[in-house]
Image (tube, rainbow, N blue to C red):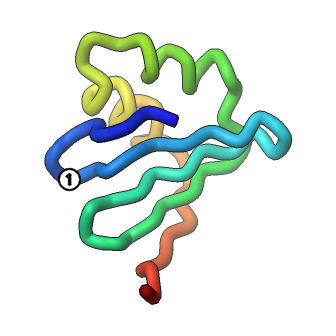
Amino acid sequence: MIPSVSRQIAFVQYDDQSSSMTVQYHTGFKASYTNVKQDEYLLVFSSANRYDSLMRLTESRFMEGNISTK
């Protein structure tokens, strides 16, 4: 898990079993991305600018999102 990516994003989590990545926003919105390779996630994790790396990774992918019902 990558904590506190930006002021907007609380954390990013990767599931290697399903090759999916979840982006949790501070607003409660949760975006899920499928077919994410582990090395792509690790590039975000190791980047000096995680937010920009995450945006590059997700900009061309289909997002499934929902608002958290707390």
Image position of 51 (left or right of 62): left
Position in image of residue 19 (x %, y %): 75, 39
Please name the residue that numbered disc 1 is placed on: 8
User: Going 27% across and 11% down the picture, which residue do you hit?
Assistant: 48
Front-most of residues 55 and 67:
67
Position in image of residue 63 (x %, y %): 53, 59
Position in image of residue 9 (x %, y %): 29, 50
Q: Count the marks: how many?
A: 1
Residue reaching furthest to the left? 7
Can you say whether 28 is above or below 38 in the image? Answer: below
User: Going 37% across and 38% down the picture, which residue do you hit?
Assistant: 3
| Residue type of the residue flagged with mark 1 | Gln
Q: Specify the quadrant of the image occupied by residue 53.
A: top left
Image position of 43 (left or right of 39): left
Can you say whether 63 is above or below 29 in the image? Answer: above
Crowding at label 1, few (<14), some or many (≥20) Cα neighbours within 10 Å?
Answer: few
Question: In what quadrant of the picture does the C terminus appear?
Answer: bottom left
Q: Specify the quadrant of the image occupied by residue 45.
A: top left
Front-most of residues 53 and 7:
7
User: Going 55% across and 18% down the picture, which residue do you hit?
Assistant: 42
Residue reaching furthest to the bottom? 69
Can you say whether 56 is above or below 65 in the image? Answer: above
Element type at marker 1? Answer: loop
User: Going 48% across and 77% down the picture, which residue do you hit?
Assistant: 66
Position in image of residue 7 (x %, y %): 15, 47
Can you say whether 44 is above or below 17 in the image? Answer: above
